[in-house]
Image (cartoon, rainbow, N blue to C red):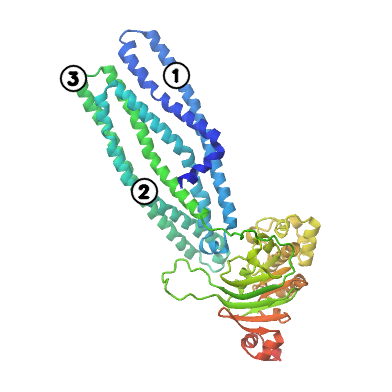
Amino acid sequence: MLKRFLSYYKPHKKIFTLDMLASLLVAMIGIVYPIITRTMLNDLIPNRNYRMVIICGVGLLMIYVVRMLLNYFIQYYGHVMGVRMQAQMRSDMFRHLEKLPYSFYDNHETGKIMSRMTNDLMDISELAHHGPENVLISVISVVTSFIYLYSIHPYLTLIVFACVPFLIVIAMAMRKKMNTAFMKSRVSVAQINAALESSISGIRVTKAFTNAEKEKEKFEVGNGNFVEARRDAYRAMGQFHSSTSFITDVFNVVVLIAGGLFLYDGQILMGDYSSFVVSVGLFITPIMTMINFMEQYQNGATGFARFIEIMDAEPEQDVSGALEVGRLDGHIELHGVTYSYETDGADDTTAPERHVLEDVSLDIEKGKTYALVGPSGGGKTTICHLIPRFYPLETGVITIDGVDIRDMSMTSLRRNIGIVQQDIYLFNASIRDNILYGRLDATQQEVEEAAKRANIHDYIMSLDEGYDTVIGERGVRLSGGQKQRLSIARVFLKNPPILILDEATSALDNTTEILIQQSLDELCRGRTTLVVAHRLSTIKNADRIAVIAGGRIVESGTHTELIDQNGMYADLYKLQFRAEDLA
């Protein structure tokens, strides 16, 4: 993990080197004051050399001016370096998140991912900046102060430094406890973010059902867990600081008693003793800096561990030598497809595995419409997800135009597939930008043509800002039918040879459904279309219909053939329509 962390310093070698050089000089300057103090007390003042006293004072002031400039450089450029490293990590994480499969997002809440990208990376940035310079300054200060103190009085120095092992032992003993506590704290922050993201996204549902108190109750559970986690972290930190502070206080007691005895015995001069007391302060300060740094280190280290956890998640990958297919014809075949979703966190690992799909075979001819119907949970949507390789195929083969989809690059495969779902996601951007998502290099004329074919152009032009109208988060300023039409316009603009309609009209009222169905019929013309529908009226004219239940195809045929079979499809149809409609 350390090697990966250090790799982020590589683009900033120059700033890092200068920052470390400035830190080194700052640490070296710290020893100047006790040296001048000792010289004045032992030589200049007793010999009444006031001219040198003034010169030393002015020289010390000039040195402090230099240290001021060095500290400015460290604070400014050091933080800039840390922010740039943070930005690079954030970019790396975002790019990696874009490559992760659907299964990752099935098991990770959005708010928790956001917490890792914001809070965690901020702490990593602080560690990246302050960590090296704090360590360098502290180590140099301790070493130089030891050498200087040893030159004043070896025995007194050894007595003082004998306290250091106690400090190290306590720090090491508390470190593991602090690490565990701060990791727990981070998890609780992520839970708060996840709860907040969920509550804000569902605020309209909360208000509609007047369940604000319930949401507050749920949020307070996470908030209470955060308080408990932070309390444990601060308890560990308090124990760490109080114990180490006591050891550092012992330094002063040791210097006072041992130094006083040496002074009484005439083994040390008053000037040397005074300089020793001042220099011990220079020794204690970096020790305390290192102690305080432990908290920052724990924050940064746990944050980076969580960052690495996401970066190590297995991304979607093409096979070696994957084919960059052009525009496909759209002949889709499934042969013996079996699939089961991961059950992360399941306690009973010995339980028999239940397949969502089991030995499913389909033949969807080019330009034909194939409908999937059946009870919820039967595996219809899973088939829709497997064709564009949103989930990896376990057993069996899916081919398009005779080519295994696993041999195609995912980009070129998905470029040939358009998807319209029940749950439409629209970005908080303009109508134009949302339609352009279908093909980013499209012209305004092409955007308008796609909108016209989706029967949404006239509505757009009735708005004050037309295609520049910002539709709000998830298209909140649009009706359900308008959202659906925008999504259809997006697919029109993409113009793929294969179309997947996953319950595209199930959330709409009957009138809106009829209007949207007209747009969908236009969209399906000339394309290989796979339709998932609960409303059987929308798929009566499909070229072929498959009934899926329990992960298997139990019936297959045209609408008329399935009605004549008087099986599950006929039962489903009778449930939706009156007997005279069936007749």
Q: Which residue occupies the extreme left position in the image? A: 265
443 or 407: nearer the viewer: 407
Labels 1 and 2: the sequence-earlier one: 1
Dot 1: within a 10 Å radius of its alpha carbon, few (fewer than 14), some, or many (20 or more) residues?
few
Observer-side mark, 1 or 2, equals 2
Residue that badge 3 annotates: 265
Which residue is pictured at 72% across the width and 64% down the height? 491
Residue that badge 2 annotates: 178
Q: Give me the disc on residue 39.
A: none
Q: Give me the disc on residue 61.
A: 1
Direction from residue 241 to residue 130 in the image, left or right:
right
Give the image location of residue 81, x and y in percent.
Answer: 54, 38
Are circles 3 and 2 on residues that touch, CB within 8 Å? no
Looking at the rendered structure, the kind of residue marked 2 is Met
Q: Is residue 457 visible?
A: no
Give the image location of residue 140, x and y in percent.
Answer: 40, 30
Labels 1 and 3: the sequence-earlier one: 1
Give the image location of residue 183, x and y in percent.
Answer: 41, 52
Q: How far apart are marks 3 and 2 (CA)?
A: 45 Å
Direction from residue 165 to residue 108 in the image, left or right:
right
Which residue is pictured at 36% across the width and 32% down the height? 285
Instruction: Label 3, secondary structure: give it.
Output: loop
Q: Is residue 65 shown above or below 532?
A: above
Are circles 1 and 2 on residues that touch, CB within 8 Å? no
Q: Is residue 116 shown above or below 461?
A: above
